[in-house]
Image (cartoon, helix red, strand yellow):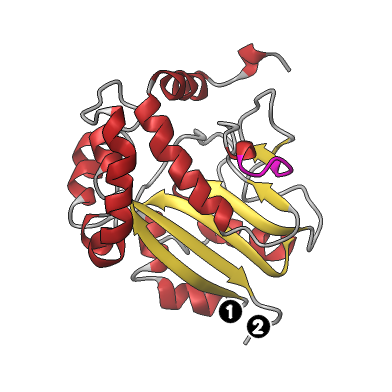
Amino acid sequence: MDSQAVDGRIAEHGRQWRQKPVLRDIYLDLYRRMAEEIAPGATLEIGGGSGIFKEFAPHVVTTDILPAPWLDLVADAQFLPVGDATFDNIVMFDVLHHIEFPRRFLAEASRVLRPGGRIILMEPAMTPLSWPFYHWMHPEPVDLSADPLRHGQPDPTRDAFAANQALPTRLVGRDRARFAAAFPEFVVLRTRWLSLFAYPLSGGFQPWCLLPQPLVRPLLKVENVLGPILGRLLGFRMLIVIEKRAAAQ
């Protein structure tokens, strides 16, 4: 597979990644947080089109629904072509809110994870500060009325970048009890609200940036202190860690 097979939007994200050192510093901090949550054993990355996570976990099996030369496997998260109880971790950065039927993914995750395995997610967080930003300034839609646990048959012609940024917040927020009832084998170990200031000031993958690079790391240190206090109000990101229990309880 040659480099021309890469989707143009992935290529553009790669260009922004290379040209924005502020964005790299912020995202590398988020990837580091995810890597710290990995349980011992085999790790599957879903939506690894960027190829970045392998810097932190070189032995991860990287997949994406869109082809790229650096991937180990092209796969839809709703139909994983791997055996039962194959992996100890599934890691996903900005992927869950792109999945048409998260319920189908969760069923697949339950199948392929071993007991004690983890799903580690980094996703947009809908908070009083972030919602207006995501709703009015971000190209991906935000629909808080959508049900992340709805049943359905995935559309094979659906754009891989179609999204609803509200789905992760719904899943571990108002739908958390329904999630627990539908998947009793899973327990949400923790949810952390991150990226209070640095990420929105960076402009994300937009060409603009309001944050000088020398201030990134000091600001991230401030966020570490304020996150547990103000994250639910100001956070733009959520780190979600879900663990598969040995048996339904």
Residue indicated by mark 1:
184
Q: Is residue 12 above or below residue 182?
A: above
Residue 235 appears in the picture as rendered: yes
Q: Which of the two residues, 20 or 117, is positioned nearer the viewer here?
A: 20
Residue 67 falls in image quadrant:
top right
Q: Is residue 80 above or below residue 191?
A: above
- Disc number at residue 92? none
Judged from the image, the secondary structure of the residue bearing numbered disc 1 is loop
From the top left corner, tell me how far across and down residue 37 is, in percent.
57, 59
From the top left corner, tell me how far across and down residue 123 is, in percent.
42, 50
Residue 106 falls in image quadrant:
bottom right
The kind of secondary structure the magenta stretch mainly shows is loop
Judged from the image, the secondary structure of the residue bearing numbered disc 2 is loop
- Give the side of residue 158 with respect to residue 51, left or right: left
Position of the N terminus by quadrant = top right
Q: Which residues are magenta?
A: 56-61
Residue 182 magenta: no
Residue located 23% across and 36% down the image: 201
- Disc number at residue 248? 2
Q: CA distance from mark 1 to mark 2?
A: 5 Å
Q: Are marks 1 and 2 in contact (CB under 8 Å)?
A: yes
